[in-house]
């Protein structure tokens, strides 16, 4: 029986050694599978990062296009406002308006108001009534001529007075209205 026991112990030791070899081989196989999974995961992460960068670039381009569209629309509206007010060169007046405010972030009512204030400040922008194009009226012009320029001025001053409530603005509005009624 001792002999059988020794053979059994020897077989058990050999089996344990073989099992250890199998464990090492299994562990190296697991490492290969893990490294392959890590490589696949890294490539997926890199793909996602590149896609996010491209998305950010596309969104920035979209936002820039929206801003350019808003500027173009507001510039067109400003040119039409100036043309209807009788400005000699509406595009030049639009350039002056762009210097005063940002056309990308302005509301239509603010654009109208800023255009009227610009016309009040820079009356030389308005078209001359004489055929020669000079700012001086002709000898035959009527003193009571209340053309669109005075009505535009009166409307702009009235809006400014109503908006601010300032005594000076109200006084200016009343003075201009009185001058128009006397002419």
Image: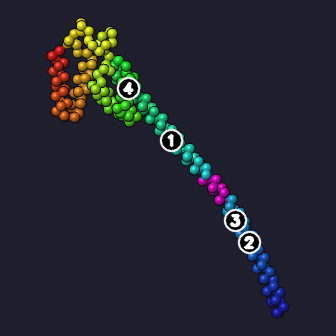
Q: Write down the residue under mark 3.
A: 31
Q: How busy is the neighbourhood of tag 3: few (under 14 within 10 Å), some, or many (20 plus)? A: few
Q: CA distance from mark 2 to mark 4?
A: 80 Å
Establish if 106 lies above or below 50: above
Q: CA distance from mark 1 to mark 2?
A: 52 Å
Task: Mark 2 and mark 4 in contact? Answer it, CB < 8 Å.
Answer: no
Q: Write down the residue under mark 4.
A: 94
Q: Write down the residue under mark 1.
A: 59
Q: Write down the residue under mark 2.
A: 24
Mark count: 4
The x, y position of residue 66, in whole percent, is 46, 35
Q: Earlier in the sequence, mark 3 or mark 4?
A: 3
User: In this view of the protein, which residue sits in the foreground, 102 or 134?
Assistant: 134
The x, y position of residue 26, in whole percent, is 73, 69
Q: How busy is the neighbourhood of tag 4: few (under 14 within 10 Å), some, or many (20 plus)? A: many
Tag shown at residue 18: none
Q: Earlier in the sequence, mark 1 or mark 2?
A: 2
Q: Which residues are magenta?
A: 37-45
Q: CA distance from mark 4 to mark 1?
A: 29 Å
Task: Mark 4 and mark 1 in contact? Answer it, CB < 8 Å.
Answer: no
Q: Earlier in the sequence, mark 3 or mark 2?
A: 2
Q: CA distance from mark 3 to mark 2?
A: 11 Å
Establish if 65 lies above or below 89: below
Label 3: element kind: helix
């Amino acid at each position: 029986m001792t002999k059988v026991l020794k053979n059994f112990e020897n077989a058990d030791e050999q089996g344990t050694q073989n099992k250890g070899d199998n464990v090492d081989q299994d562990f190296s196989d697991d490492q290969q599978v893990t490294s392959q999974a890590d490589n696949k995961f890294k490539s997926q992460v890199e793909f996602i990062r590149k896609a996010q960068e491209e998305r950010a670039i596309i969104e920035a381009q979209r936002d820039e296009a929206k801003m350019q569209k808003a500027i173009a629309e507001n510039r067109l509206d400003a040119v039409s406002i100036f043309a209807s007010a009788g400005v000699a060169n509406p595009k030049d007046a639009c350039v002056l308006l762009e210097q005063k405010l940002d056309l990308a972030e302005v509301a239509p009512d603010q654009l109208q108001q800023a255009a009227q204030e610009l016309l009040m400040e820079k009356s030389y922008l308005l078209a001359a009534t004489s055929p020669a194009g000079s700012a001086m009226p002709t000898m035959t012009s009527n003193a009571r001529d209340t053309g669109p320029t005075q009505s535009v001025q009166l409307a702009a001053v009235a809006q400014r007075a109503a908006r601010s409530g300032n005594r000076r603005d109200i006084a200016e509005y009343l003075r201009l209205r009185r001058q128009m009624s006397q002419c």
